[in-house]
Image: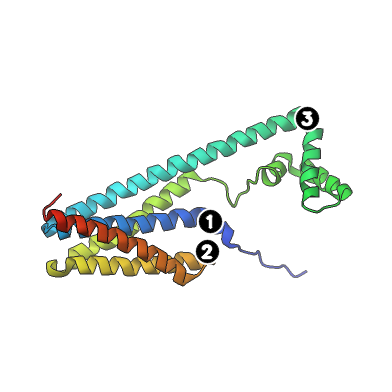
Amino acid sequence: MRRHPAERHYSERIGWLRAAVLGANDGIVSTASLVVGIAAANAARADILLAAVAALVAGAMSMAAGEYVSVSSQSDTEKADLEREKGELLADEASEHEELKRIYMDRGIAAELAAQVAEQLMAHDALGSHARDELGLSETNRARPIQAAMASAATFAAGAALPVTLVSVAPMAGIIAVVAGGSLASLALLGMISARAGGASAARGAARVTFWGALAMAATAGIGYAFDAVV
């Protein structure tokens, strides 16, 4: 018998893609904006580089902590719902069977067939069936705090490494143009890649991330020029 290859869907990438894109985007935007702002205040290269490296380390740790706390809260809620569902199954399995049957009927399945499906699924994995069809929980969208934290930290550091590198090699006379230009080009590429990975328009993805990156850099450059001193 011929076996069909397993289908891959864009929704399977939601968890790690969101954390990865957010981390890389924030790494580039925040670090490049800081660099542009300090450079606009006529700081020395050593000061700019120190600030950029500090921003990379602090930002990566902040992203990891933020993602871990946020996704852990989601995970705790999921676990609480599962525990509650487990208790309801132990207390009144017949009512839970009827509840699952009603869910399938609402989706268009005939009452008799819905009752059979509910019975067979509950016999196989009662808690899993209710988690999936009643609570909307599955392996695809399950909260993974460690994975999200590591992805955010790693991608933030990878994104922030770009402006740090540009600060190291760019001539001081054109450091703002080099950092801003290189960072915006990288943001556009990141937007295109993330959009394609999620099945969306590459042009739209590039445009929106580049716009916000340019706005952030313009704002910090304005502050640097206004103070014309290291702040």
In space, the residues marked 3 and 1 are separated at their CA atoms by 35 Å
* Residues at discs 1 and 2 in contact (Cβ within 8 Å): yes
On the question of residue 32 being in view, the answer is: no
For label 1, the SS is helix
Q: Residue 92 carries which label?
A: 3
Decide if residue 195 is on the left or right side of residue 88: left
**Number of other residues with Cα within 10 Å of mark 3, as a class: few under 14, some 14 to 19, many 20 or more:** few
Amino acid type of disc 2?
Gly
- At label 1, counting other C-alpha atoms closer than 10 Å, the crowd grade (few under 14, some 14-19, many 20 or more) is some
Q: Is mark 2 on a helix, strand or loop?
A: loop
Look at label 3 and name its amino acid: Asp
Q: Give the residue pinned by disc 1.
A: 14
| Residue sitting at x 28%, y 69% | 182
Q: Residue 54 carries which label?
A: none
* Occupied quadrant, residue 125: top right
Q: Nearer the viewer, residue 48 or 226?
A: 226
Give the quadrant of the N terminus. Answer: bottom right
Q: Which of marks 3 and 1 is nearer the N terminus?
A: 1
Q: Which residue appears farthest toward the top when viewing the image?
A: 91
Report the residue at 38% width, 46% height from top: 64
For this rendering, which residue is in front, 227 or 213?
227
- Residue 188 in which image quadrant: bottom left
Q: Which residue is drawn at 69% across and 33% down?
A: 86
Q: Where does the image place residue 38, in percent across and percent down from the top left? A: 17, 56
* Number of dots carrying numbers: 3
Asked whether the beta carbons under mark 3 and mark 1 sit within 8 Å of each other, the answer is no
Q: Distance between the residues labelled 2 and 3?
A: 41 Å
- Residue under circle 2? 198
Task: For residue 197, say whether it is visible.
Answer: yes
